[in-house]
Amino acid sequence: LEIEIEWMGFSSRSHPSGEVGLYLFGNLIKRLEYRHGMPPKVNRVTFATNSDSQNVVLPFTVGIKDPKSPRSLGLSDDARELGIAVRRLCITMPGIACTD
């Protein structure tokens, strides 16, 4: 299968870069890096499953290294710790285009 993720990093001049790990079944499958001012990105990751069934549970986790809140950066009163905004996530068979 393939995961396609469209995303953008949360950054500012005082927090200019970051790193995110995408994990499947607890294993790192892709490391994403972002910098301040970078436009949204699309990444594809191919992975194998041990199931022939069409109904597969995929424990997918996004691990954010050193998340920051807008409040801690002096940008707003928002105290949520942020790392990335996931704009779209699609799981398909390899070579099959994701459709909106």
Image (cartoon, grey):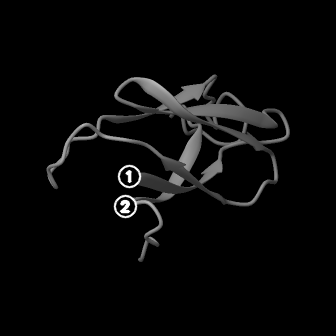
Query: Which quadrant holds residue 73?
Result: top right
For label 1, the residue is 1
Compare residues 51 and 98 and report the one nearer the observer. Answer: 51
Query: Which quadrant holds residue 26?
Result: top left
Quadrant, the C terminus: bottom left
For label 2, the residue is 93
Q: Is residue 40 left or right of residue 44?
A: right
Residue type beneath disc 1: Leu
Vertical order, 42 against 72 (above or below): below
Judge the density around disc 2: few (<14), some (14-19), many (≥20) Cα neighbours within 10 Å: few
Q: Position of residue 35 (x, y in %)?
A: 80, 43
Secondary structure, mark 1, is: loop
Q: Position of residue 45 (x, y in %)?
A: 52, 48
Q: Which residue is found at the position 60% from the left and 28% from the top?
A: 67
Residue type beneath disc 2: Met
Compare residues 16 and 58 and report the one nearer the observer. Answer: 58
Compare residues 50 and 43 and report the one nearer the observer. Answer: 50
Q: Is residue 88 left or right of residue 69?
A: left
Vertical order, 48 against 54 (above or below): above
Secondary structure, mark 2, is: loop
Vertical order, 100 against 3 (above or below): below
